[in-house]
Amino acid sequence: MAVRVADGGAVKVGLLGCGTVGQAVVRSINEGGSTIERASGHRLVVGPILVRDPAKPRPGVDPSLITTDPKRVLDDPSVAIVIEVMGGLDPTLGYLRRALDRGASVVTANKQLLARHGPELLLAAEQSGAEIRFEASACAAIPVIKVLRESLLAAEITAVTGIVNGTTNFILTEMSRSGLSYADALARAQELGYAEPDPTEDVNGADAAAKMAIMASIAFHSRVRIDDVPHEGIDRLHAEDIEHARSLGFVVKLLGVARLVNGAVTARVYPALVPAGHRLAAIGGPDNAVLLESRNTGEIMLVGPGAGGAETASAVVADILSILGTHKGSFLHNALADAGRGIAPPGEVTSSFYLRMFVADRPGVLARIASVFGDEGLSIRSVVQSGSGDEARLVLIIHAGREERMDAAVERLGALEVVRGAPVMLRVLGDGEGGG
Ligand SMILES: NC(=O)c1ccc[n+]([C@@H]2O[C@H](COP(=O)([O-])OP(=O)(O)OC[C@H]3O[C@@H](n4cnc5c(N)ncnc54)[C@H](OP(=O)(O)O)[C@@H]3O)[C@@H](O)[C@H]2O)c1
């Protein structure tokens, strides 16, 4: 590890760029500093930050760190890790070579740069003993690179199939669910911020091809560049074909597909019909998903947001931690890594609930039951009643509330003379689960 550690175990990181992702990285380091320190044994210090226009507002970023002089980030020996979140190929490639050549490690989110110049950057890192990490370059928050290069390193990956562009997935989802034309779905994506004003790279498949080149390189331990990845986009798709596909039991997705054919790598991007029951068919809206197939592990699918400042910053910070290593404060082995949070008493956890019970079918019963929930500070979302003789079955959904209050309500209900037998209670996933 070529990281130079300054006084007190502090590690200075410099940034190239401070836009959407850069600002989220600075926020994440400032807010998550103690977690990073507990895990790695190093305190991260944000150092110089290169931008084009120093006058732009950058909330939460110390203005004294902002510079337009690349030397302050690239050539300062106290900057141990250079984070590249400026994008583009030139001057970015030269900057990263310069940082790696002097032994600084590099974290980059730049898929186009890696998909074109990855091999030479990896070589430069190898020659100087520095590290280059690029988790954020493929599918932002989804930790697919780390899973491929570490967790599944020896798993013998046979195929990587992904929905790796959220913009096109959103457009296709809209075309399919609402019957919108391509142009209208694109306009809606732009309105909601899921598509750039110039969406060319997304809709023509070039963005997905860059990500597939990076993932195929890691999955198959090879060197795949974007020029090796033929890509078709969705810009020539007709709503009519999406409708025909639907009537035949398929959904249309823009897929990146990389696999081994007779020991050689093939990686391509194209719109494809996916059977409606396939797990990739369920990925809707701007989400990304990557299905990894391997001889040893079968299928593993990773799903999550493929863009966004905070999401991408999460991958950048994870890369910084990978470079520093967690051996000094491994979460399970080191007292320092214990945040001392304790265990929440079960009764304080909140959830929403399903309740089924049989009650006497006579006037006033529902009011008595409702008053029990009211007394416990719980509110009823829905009630379905079905009668059978002098008995009625009640099925209730209760809005999120503390479990201890629900337990008390169930006990009181069970003791009511109008309630027959013990009520059956199940928790409802998702709606207001948490602490309270
Ligand atoms: N946004 C996402 O959701 C996302 C997701 C995954 C990956 N990425 C990747 O992350 C990188 C950054 O994306 P972003 O959305 O944060 O971009 P952005 O908001 O446009 O920010 C770019 C930053 O780089 C600076 N910059 C650009 N060219 C420069 C140059 N030649 N010299 C000095 N500074 C320069 C800009 O300076 P000024 O502020 O002065 O203009 C700005 O601070 C890109 O490679 C992108 O592909 C982004």
Image (tube, helix red, strand yellow):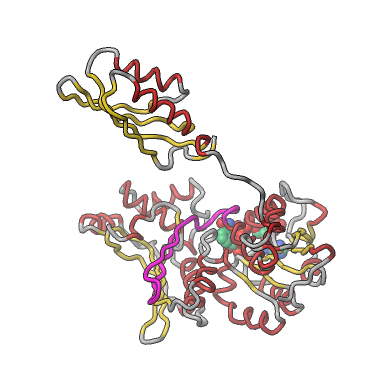
Position of 227 relative to 142 (above/below): below
Residue 415 visible in image: yes
Q: Residue at x 59, y 81 (%)?
A: 119
Say if 62 sits above or below 116 in the image. Answer: above
Q: Quadrant of residue 258?
A: bottom left
Quarter of the N terminus within the rendering: bottom right
Magenta segment boundaries in residue numbering: 289-311
Q: In the image shown, does 293 or 284 lie closer to the viewer? A: 293
Residue depicted at 48% across the width and 68% down the height: 206
- Residue 24 in magenta? no
x and y percentages locating residue 344 in the rendered image: 56, 41
- Visible residue check, residue 85: no
Q: How many marks?
A: 0
Where does ligand 1 appear, by image quarter? bottom right
- Asked if residue 108 lies left or right of residue 103, the reply is left
Q: Who is closer to the viewer here, 19 or 355?
A: 355
Q: Residue 162, how many percent across, how many down? A: 41, 66
Figure quadrant of the C terminus = top right
Residue at screen point 47% across, 28% down: 405
Residue drawn at point x = 83 percent, y = 62 percent: 8
- Of residues 51 and 156, the one nearer the viewer is 156
Residue situated furthest right in the rendering: 7
Which quadrant of the structure image shows residue 238? Answer: bottom left
Residue 303 place in picture, x, y as percent: 45, 58
Main SS of the magenta part reads strand
Q: Residue furthest left?
A: 389
